[in-house]
Amino acid sequence: MPVAPVDKLAQWWLAASNIAILTGAGMSAESGVPTFRGAGSGLWSRFDPGALASPGAFRANPDLVWGWYQWRRAVIQRAQPNAGHRALAALERLRGTLAVITQNVDDLHERAGSRNVIHLHGELFRTICSECGVPVPDAPVSAAMADNPEQRLAPPRCQRCGGAARPDVTWFGEPLPEPAIDAAYVLARTCDLLVVVGTSGHVAPASVLPAIVNRRGGCVVEINPEATWLTSEASLAWRSTAAVALPTLFARLSHSATR
Ligand code: OAD
């Protein structure tokens, strides 16, 4: 009889010394946060990333870009962590430690209780000056902002240099935050199991982490309802969603722990 994906993953999980999780937009999809490349509903099929997610776009049209990010903040503020986020936090408690490398700029892992979250693409709820880089106090986000992605809003100004404030996220053409990518590489070079949840694998360097684990003889497991660019790196592709598979894994492992 074929072994169920949860049993296979649970076996590898229990045998592993170091485990890391890599998450992408699909992790938050069941919280109602849109992914980037989903057909029809994905952000990049509705909006032009070149006009909204690059330093040049911000210089050309700061009010449009700031308004779009206030919309994204409002959407995420009203969302709740889903059962998958909560299961990862519970798995961390069960194991004592569990690193989550995320491409997501939302704060849903933290709100679910995960304590070791590495944000590769920055954090939406942090604001910095676009000129001098210092932190800038946030402008309030109202629930109504979630209704209008095309609103134009003037960004707050930096109290030190007067520059326009921007969200502390990585835009196209910008380098990733160095401490985050360094920590992710260390995890990829030391973990024996990497569980990849809800990413299409289109964007490097996050997309090269599974290959690093693989080359060292580590095990890569993909949790995603669809095949992706990363499927060929996976020893196991579990065709399920984050909010279904991860609680199933937690239930299976907590059952083993109490036996
Ligand atoms: P994508 O939108 O490219 O991919 C989302 C993936 O999630 C797809 O493979 C879906 O099949 C999968 N998915 C959808 N619903 C799911 C669910 N409920 N459970 C599990 N998986 C599900 O998003 P990312 O791969 O995260 O970068 O995109 C990577 C980067 O591209 C983003 O961080 C962003 C974007 O441009 C920047 O903004 C810098």
Image (cartoon, rainbow, N blue to C red):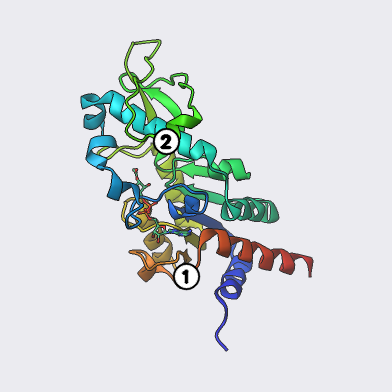
Query: Which residue position holds label 1?
Result: 239
User: For residue 87, what is the image quadrant?
Assistant: bottom right
Residue at point 39%, 38% (across, down): 178
Pick the front one: 40 or 62: 40
Q: Amino acid at mark 1?
A: Arg
Pick the front one: 197 or 61: 61
Q: Residue furthest bottom?
A: 1
Quick one: quadrant of the N terminus?
Answer: bottom right
Q: Amino acid at mark 2?
A: Asp
Quick one: quadrant of the C terminus?
Answer: bottom right
Q: Position of residue 215 (x, y in %)?
A: 39, 66
Q: Position of residue 22 (x, y in %)?
A: 47, 54
Residue at point 52%, 55% (across, down): 20
Q: Position of residue 171 (x, y in %)?
A: 31, 37
Pick the front one: 147 or 200: 147
Q: Is residue 97 left or right of residue 220?
A: right
- Could you say whether the residue bearing mark 1 is in a helix, strand or loop? loop
Per the rendering, the mark at residue 147 is: 2
**Label 2, label 1: how far apart the Cα atoms are:** 33 Å
Residue at point 61%, 74% (across, down): 7
Residue at point 78%, 66% (across, down): 258
Ligand 1 closer than 8 Å to label 1 CB: no
Q: Residues within 10 Å of mark 1 (few under 14, many from 20)?
A: some
Per the rendering, the mark at residue 115 is: none
Pick the front one: 174 or 66: 66
Q: Is residue 83 above or below residue 72?
A: below
Q: Is residue 136 left or right of residue 176?
A: right
